[in-house]
Amino acid sequence: VDGLPSLAGKTLAVTGSTTGTGFVLAREAAKKGARVLMLNRPSTRSEAAVERLTPTGARAGGGVFANPVTSPKASKASAQLADETGGSVEHVDCDLTSLASCEAAAASVLRRVGAAGLDVLCCNAAVMHHADLVTADGFDVQMQTNMLGHHVLVCRLWPALAAAAERRGEARVVMHSSAARYMDGRGSGMFFLPRWCRKLQPESFERHADGELGGEGWPVPGKALLFHGPKQSRYQQSKLANFVYAYALRDRCASAGS
């Protein structure tokens, strides 16, 4: 982190930033002077995440974090940042299981950044091994949370990314995937991968009813429990989608000279 350049004057939008990698990114980017928009579902967790990263009025321009986090390691990191935080954090309502919420979140981001644009959209949020249930929009809950909702954000926020690139020379979309994209869940061993897992399956992206993508059927006796069965197959497809999407987006950017 110490070797990274300043992010002063730049704005980042990060999904899934209440804990884990998203929270750490928000914290470290704010330390580097960025304005960070934390896109999360409205909850006490999202409120706490913003509060933990918001300096109190004790010292102008940066001070003591309002509430220390529970992890001793993270608490120490937050304490070290207390006098160094030059950026800011803001909460933006965004429920990836609702495409309407994603549209509203994007509209909120566009209003907030205005002509200055958005420098980074980090598509970090994800869920894993959920039941075979569909969202109100009719899509698998893992695929919509991990990929389809993020796709809406990418599309709607593209003008803001383009504006930042024009003003400051670059902007980027970051897609977080997982090694789970190689683990198809269809009865194969982790190190003996079938051809199936190398391709996106159309049914994973189509509207359907609860239980139509394999049901529960998990765990599978005698198999590595985390990486087998329909739950893993659905998760694998969403993580493979993140991976493929990044390449496809890069190709479209290149062909458009963007």
Image (tube, helix red, strand yellow):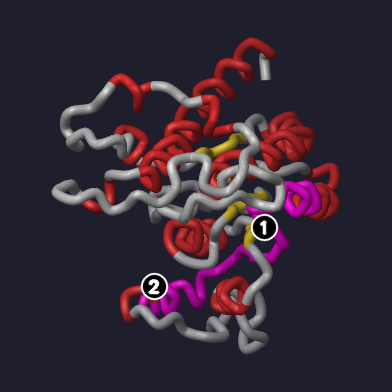
| Viewer-side label of 2, 1 | 1
Magenta stretch contains residue 4: no
- Identity of the amino acid at label 2? Ala
* Element class at badge 1: loop
Q: Which mark is residue 95?
A: 1
Who's the residue at 28% across and 53% down the image?
219
Question: Which residue of the protein is positioned furthest toward the top in this rendering?
Answer: 255
Residue highlighted by disc 2: 77
Residue at 65% x, 42% y is 119
Residue 40, numbered label = none
Q: What residue type is disc 1 on?
A: Asp
Return the x and y of residue 155 as percentages of the image width and height.
72, 34
At a point 50% along the width and 57% down the height, the residue shown is 22
Q: Position of residue 154 (x, y in %)?
A: 67, 37
> Is residue 121 visible in this depiction of the protein?
no
Which quadrant holds the C terminus? top right
Residue 188: x, y in percent? 21, 33
Quadrant of the rendering where the N terminus is positioned = bottom left
Is residue 33 visible in this depiction of the protein?
A: yes
Q: Which residues are magenta?
A: 75-104
**SS for callout 2:** helix
Q: Identify the residue shown where x is 49% and y is 47%.
A: 5
Compute the Cα span from label 2 to label 1.
Answer: 28 Å
- Of residue 160 and residue 220, the one placed in the foreground of this image is 220
Quarter of the image for residue 165 reads top right
